[in-house]
Structure formats: C-alpha cells, structure tokens
Amino acid sequence: MSNLVRNIIRFAFFILFQVFVLGKIPPLHQFVVPYLYFLFILWLPFKITRGALLLLGFLFGLALDLFTKTPGLHAAACTLIAYVRPFLISLLMPKEATEIGYSEPSITSMGFVPYAVYVLVLTFLHHSYLVFMEWLHFGNFLYFIGKVFATTAISLLLILITETLFVRKAKYRTNVA
Amino acid sequence: MRNVFLFIARFSNLLFFLFLQVLALSMLFRYNKYHQAAYMNVANEVTGRFYVRYNKIETYFSLQKENEKLRMQNADLLNKLKSDFAVPDSSMQLVTDTFRVDSLEQYRKFLYLPAKVIGNAVDGQNNFITLHRGSKQGVDVNMAVIGPEGVVGKIVNVSPNMSVAMSLLHRKNSVVALLKKGGGFGEVTWDGKDPRFVTLNNIPRTIKVAKGDTVVTSSYSDIFPPGKVVGYVAEVREDKSSSTYSLKVKTATDFYSVQHAFVVKNIQKAEMDSLMSKVKKD
C-alpha cells in the first residue's frame, strides 16, 4: 500500500473512531476526555514538506470540528502540533536517520525513548492548547490543570494500546524503493 | 522590496502557521458568538449523514429503555384524556362533541414536531445535539427542543434536513425557569463541569426550597412552552454575595441517552415579535 493511500485511510479511520467510538464513551470524570485522533499527525511520514504538514493538520482538525460543531477548535490545536513536529523530530533524531531511514515515526524507527518523548510532548501540547481555549470561556485554573493532565494521561494510555495492537511494519527505505 | 520577498520566503512556514491559527481561532470565536456560519449548514448535512448511519445501529441497543420512556409519556398523556374524567353525579351527561376537533386550532400556541436525535455530545464545554429534521420539515432557529423527560435545548442552526440544537449543557444556554412549588423565577445555566447537573440562579431566599423540588419552564419564555420539567433540585446552596439561592439541579433529561425529542414551534411568536419591536421603536 502506498503512503498516500494508507494515510487517506488513516485520516478517515481516526476521525470516525474519535467521533463514533471514543466520543460515545460516557464520561468517567469531568476531567477525562479520551482523545486519540491526533495520532494521525504523529504518524505522518518524515518526508512530508512543512507546508503540506501544516495544511493537512488544519484540514484534519477541521474535519473533526465539523462533527463536534466547534469549527476551529481542534483545527487550531492540530496546526500547532503540526508546526512543532518537525522541530521536535530534528531535535530527537540525528539528521541522517531521517534522511535515509524509515518512512514514518514509530518505536522501531526512532527508538523507544525518543519516540516516547515525541509522543508525550506533542500530546501534552495538543491538550494544553485545546483545554486552554476552553478555559478562556470558563476560567477555572484547577479545572485547566486537572483536565490537561488527566486528558494527557488517558491519551497516552490509548496511544500505548494502539501501538501494541497495531504493530506498524516499519519499512526501511532503500535506494531502490 | 527584495528584502520583503526574502523575509516571506524565509519565514513562509511560520507565516503559514500563523495564518492557519488566526483562521481557526476566528472561525471558533465567531461561531461561538452567533452559531451561524454558511459552511456549517453544508457540513451539518454531510456529518448528519454519518450520524444517521450510526444512529440506526445505536438505537437498537437502547430500544427497551426508549420504549419504557415513551410508554411513561403515553401513560401521562392518556391520563389527561377527557374521557378519563367521569363525573359521579348525573347532572351532566357525556355527549359526543359535535364541534370540530380543531376548533381551538386558531388559538394554538405551541406545535410539537417529533424529531430523531442523531448526534449528541456531553463531553465538551459547549454541547450540541443534532436532529434529523430541518428547515424543509418546518424547523427554524430559536425553537425549543423538549425530550420525553423534559427540556433538552434550543435550535441554533438549521440546514435543509438537519438541525443543531444547543443543549442545556452549553455555556451560552440560559433558560428562564421557576420552582413548581413556591414559584421563584431564576435562570438555568451550566458551569461546564458535570453533565448531570445544571444551576438555577437568582432564586430569592424568601422562597422555601427543599431537595427534590421540581424546576419547570416559565410562561414568560416565547421559546419554551410553560411547565416543562427542567430538573429536580439536588442541592440548595446559598449565594454568599447576594440574598439569593443558587440551586444545583439534576436535569430531568438524561443527556447521555436522549434519542427522541420534539421541536416546539411557537406559532404566535411572529405576532409577539412584531408587537415587541413596535414597543421598542416607540
């Protein structure tokens, strides 16, 4: 399967999964909202240009927004992590590895610790920004802090489950392919 | 000039990022203010299709519960039928009425339009409910949405076949309500925390309030029909800053599982509005 087709399927799958599976879970606590959809952006290939990454992040967030009737909320948060992603990758990985290595970020391509840091930072950033915009409406600091941490924790758990359930075959790109 | 181009080329990604952020945020804040956006009508139609598909499956799982609710509502309505009230004395005779059934039609104020709930959320700060009934089927903005158990919300956006209602669990929601016993008027709002509870503010301390008292919609509203249950008092809290109560109210509608609702049209609203606008002009 080509990268393009795979990512188109992922796009649809993550949105539908977020809306119709995670969105239907009765809330466990006011702080806990299960978010997984943004993993799509974390899984995009290394080779994508930064402009395309930003645009894709925006459209992806907007697609979820159209379902949740909050136009712009998730789009803003997704654009933010799409903007930060390349900096983080170049920080966590040596330059050569991204140039000739695997096609997309994963445990095998980056190593466990760098990948964990990569996921943690972007998840935290995404949730902080998202909850921050909600906080602007409500203005309760405890609510803000509690929700950011609880939501981040639940997202990390979901990502861990996803990573263990769907082992992505990390293709090593050679000059031939 | 050349430097300007160089600057743009150098920071193109940052500028693009900022552009997208501004775009997203302006969309968000403008929508939160007015709940009207042309592109959202189109989006509602598209996302609505997905919701309809999903809903077809989802409703199977709650059929029993839903039937139970509708049976309760039926029983409630049947108990109000005229034929259920018999006068023991024979000073009156039960005669079949020869009047037209709809002789009262010209005085009708509220008309109930049944609608299926196809999309629902409770986990955000501003929660919306999508209904499978739109402008083609007579739904318009600012109509009330009532469920079998009580008040659900208010229509904020309409497309040809779908409509979106702001539920009671919305930051901007405010419903004028009163206590059924005692009758103090107040405003129902949501603090964005627990989707099972809303707050009823501005109830004067002079009124006796007990846990479990019923909160109903008032007759002052031109959107909500009077006497519809909003919820039941769960906790009586005194507002320290003023001489009023701030009551924690358990919503009558279970927002986790609302499946059917009625859109309520106020037929006399146009007349009322034109009258009010005349008053304001003078």
Image (spheres, coloured by chain):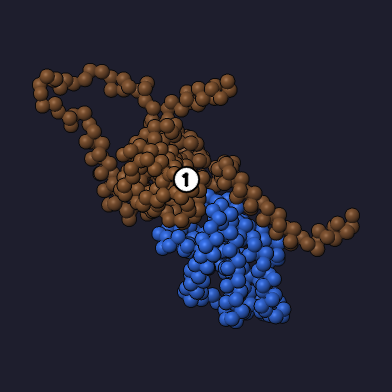
Q: Residue at x 53, y 49 (%)?
A: A69
Q: Quadrant of the C terminus of chain B?
A: top right
Direction right: furthest residue: B1
Left-right relation of B169 to A88: left
Left-right relation of A28 to A59: left
Q: Residue at x 44, y 54 (%)?
A: B122
Q: Chain A rendered in what hue? A: blue
The percent coordinates of residue B87 (x first, y second) are 14, 26
Is A7 above or below relative to B200? below
**Number of callouts:** 1
Element under label 1? loop
Is A61 above or below relative to B34? below
The percent coordinates of residue B110 (x first, y second) are 38, 30
Determine if residue B150 is in view: no
The percent coordinates of residue A116 (x first, y second) are 57, 77
Instruction: Please give the residue where the numbered disc 1 appears in the rendered image.
Output: B242
User: Label 1 lies in what chain?
Assistant: B
**Colour-to-chain, brown:** B
Q: Residue at x 50, y 36 (%)?
A: B141
Instruction: In this rendered view, identify the residue nearer to me: A102 or B73.
Output: B73
Mark 1 residue crowding within 10 angstroms, few (<14) / some (14–19) / many (20+) = few
The three-letter code of the residue at mark 1 reads Ser
Instruction: In this rendered view, identify the residue nearer to me: A105 or A116.
Output: A116
